[in-house]
Image: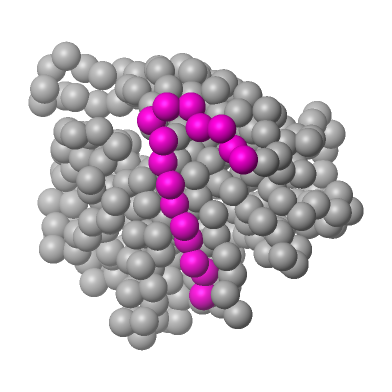
Amino acid sequence: MIDVKAAFHDADYVLPKSFDLGIFGSSIDDRTQYSIQYVEKYTNSSIELIYDKEQLNLVVNGDSIECHNFPIYLKEKNISSLILDSTSLDVPELALVIKAIASIPKLEVLILYVEPENYSGNSPIFEQETFTLSDSIIGFEGDGIPTISLPVDSHSPRKFVFFLGFEGTRLLNAIETYDVSEDEAKIVFGVPAFQSGWESKSIRSNMPTLKEYKFKGRISYCSASSPKSALAILREAGSSESCEHIYVVPIGTKPNTVGALLYILEKPEGIRLLYDQPKKKVGRSSGVGRKHFYMFTILQ
């Protein structure tokens, strides 16, 4: 069982101590520039971690490391505390780091997430109101993430839990790729959203697909900023469904994604991650919003 504690601050927050190591991804907008600088300020050392979708490995401060060797790399650093910048790290990097740190005993982990003030690509026409967040998407049928991805079993009972965001085509692609039926789907929207009205954008973007596949009766909600809410949703799905496999599809908010990844850490058997690996648009958001801090403990 994993216990998650959370706090947030609208203004800058001074951490009471420094951490041994910080891990962050690429800077692509105002908030990732802020979060990376924040991690560097409060850690004794830090690394930039990028998942190379072409070579299927990790790039650590410019050097390539095979994914299966990354846990060894972290262990050799002999750290007792760590800050993860989930703002700049994408799902593959987060998944690989969270899996790797599970084998480091008594490690103190702080996960940082910084909200944007706004997202880019907002149309002035209400009916077409969308956010432009990705330049391209590899798709669910593309190469998986080494040590993380497993094949989808179409011959045994299964459940798909979708955490949804603003890009409705991603849900449609997942349904078509895996031939998901109505009774196999659980749809989760981030409500309340980071800002009032953003939940409407997400729902409107995905509603055509939900109507087409008759998934409207499969909708649930959890707070967009809460990994703990996402954990609760998945625990309920895991306890109530007699499925051999539950497939988690984190295409919504980053805090919900963190919760989903922690659940996979909590129940590694039978829980599988599916991700379509979008290329995030540079300048996809503007401004620096609320700062969230999450700490988790693995209870024995």
Q: Is residue 30 left or right of residue 190?
A: right
Query: Quadrant location of residue 27?
Result: top right
Residue 18 appearing in the image: yes
User: In the image, which residues are magenta?
Assistant: 1-16
Which residue is painted at 59% across and 70% down in the image?
298
Which residue is painted at 13% across and 63% down in the image?
217
Q: Is residue 15 magenta?
A: yes
Measured along the vertical axis of the image, is residue 139 above or below residue 267? above
Q: Is residue 123 left or right of residue 298?
A: left
Q: Is residue 58 magenta?
A: no
The residue sitting at the top extreme is 124
Measured along the vertical axis of the image, is residue 75 above or below residue 114? below
Residue 183, x across and y down, in percent: 24, 72
> Coloring scheme of the render?
one colour
Q: Nearer the viewer, residue 178 or 124?
A: 124
Measured along the vertical axis of the image, is residue 196 above or below residue 272? above
